[in-house]
Image: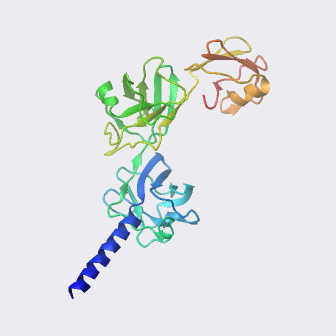
Amino acid sequence: MRQQHSALLLCAGLLAAAHGVCSAQLQSVTLSSTTSLVVSLSEPADTSATNCTSAFSYTTAGGAAKPPTGNAFANCTFNNPQTITLFYAPSVSFSAGDRLNFARNQTVLRNTTANSAPWEPLATPVTVQPVVQAVTLTSPTTLEVKLPLQSTFTPVNATVCNTAFQLWPAGGTAAKPDFAFTKCAAGTDQTIVVLTIPTGSYTAGDGVQLVANQSVLQFGTVGYAPTKSPVVVMPRIMTASLVSATGVVVALPTVSSLTASGASSCNAVFAIRNGSNVIPSALSDCTMASDGMSVRLTLANATFFGACKAPGL
């Protein structure tokens, strides 16, 4: 009898361990867009699943199904075997505290490293956390951090700001040593955070990262989470000024290079817009200033077509 009891305990222990292995795969759930979530798995999934939306359960902070009936997600795509993007159904939107779990008895999503066993629900669903959407260099000393939601940013001073944000070098494994933001503030619409950096501290490829478990930047009661890798800072045109009938000078926030010139190359980099309409073949040439801080655009004719924009700058 004692041996039978021991065998039953051993069997229960093995089942519990197996349940833990199968159910401990939902690593994180983040939101960088108001229309979708990114799910990170700690082990690869079978990417042949044709409708992975049914593999998940979406609930409110209080545990109620969201929506009460039907599916929370309209579609899903595998970015890679360990990353899935879930697209919200038209009637569903994110609220602070929303949680994701594997659906009970789902068989659609399977673990390829565990004999293709379907993953089981976690004991506690994973709370969805927003993440930084994009970062742009808007002046030699200013970074703009774009957020997916109107959020609360409450730094008392620069010291507190540096407990939330870090600047990482390109390819780095840690934040830049001895670097600190000198000032930070929330934008007026609460979807931008403006970070001030010391003069000359930006280098091409730098990225902004949030500190894990920070509480300075929040949506409702939920803190923003770090991204898997720092969000690379993208320089952006500061100003474009008409300096002659056919000349436009574009001011840049950092020393830059222009690897080609001539009409076709210039029109591939820069766009001249008239309202929302791009004027085709608007440029005849473009040249970089000797200091790398501005580009002179030559218009194909003397008609000034409006605002100038270079995608990616």
Q: Give the quadrant of the N terminus.
A: bottom left
Residue lying farthest to the bottom in this orientation: 1
Q: Give the quadrant of the C terminus.
A: top right
Q: How are the colours assigned in the image?
A: rainbow
184 horizontally vs 288: left or right:
left
Question: Residue 226, relative to residue 245: is it above or below?
Answer: below
Report which quarter residue 281 is drawn in: top right
Residue lying farthest to the left in this orientation: 2
Instruction: Residue 259: give x, y in percent of width and height.
Output: 70, 24
Residue at 75 percent of width and 27 percent of height: 265
Q: How many marks?
A: 0
163 horizontally vs 140: left or right:
left
Residue lying farthest to the front in this orientation: 3
Instruction: Residue 136: give x, y in percent of width and height.
Output: 51, 30
306 horizontally vs 81: left or right:
right
Residue at 39 percent of width and 43 percent of height: 225
Residue at 49 percent of width and 37 percent of height: 231
Question: Residue 79, relative to residue 101: is it above or below?
Answer: above
Instruction: Residue 255: give x, y in percent of width and height.
Output: 58, 19
Nearest to the observer: residue 123 or residue 33:
123
Nearest to the observer: residue 155 or residue 164:
164
Nearest to the observer: residue 10 or residue 99:
10
Instruction: Residue 120: give x, y in percent of width and height.
Output: 40, 68
Nearest to the observer: residue 157 or residue 213:
213
Residue at 76 percent of width and 25 percent of height: 282
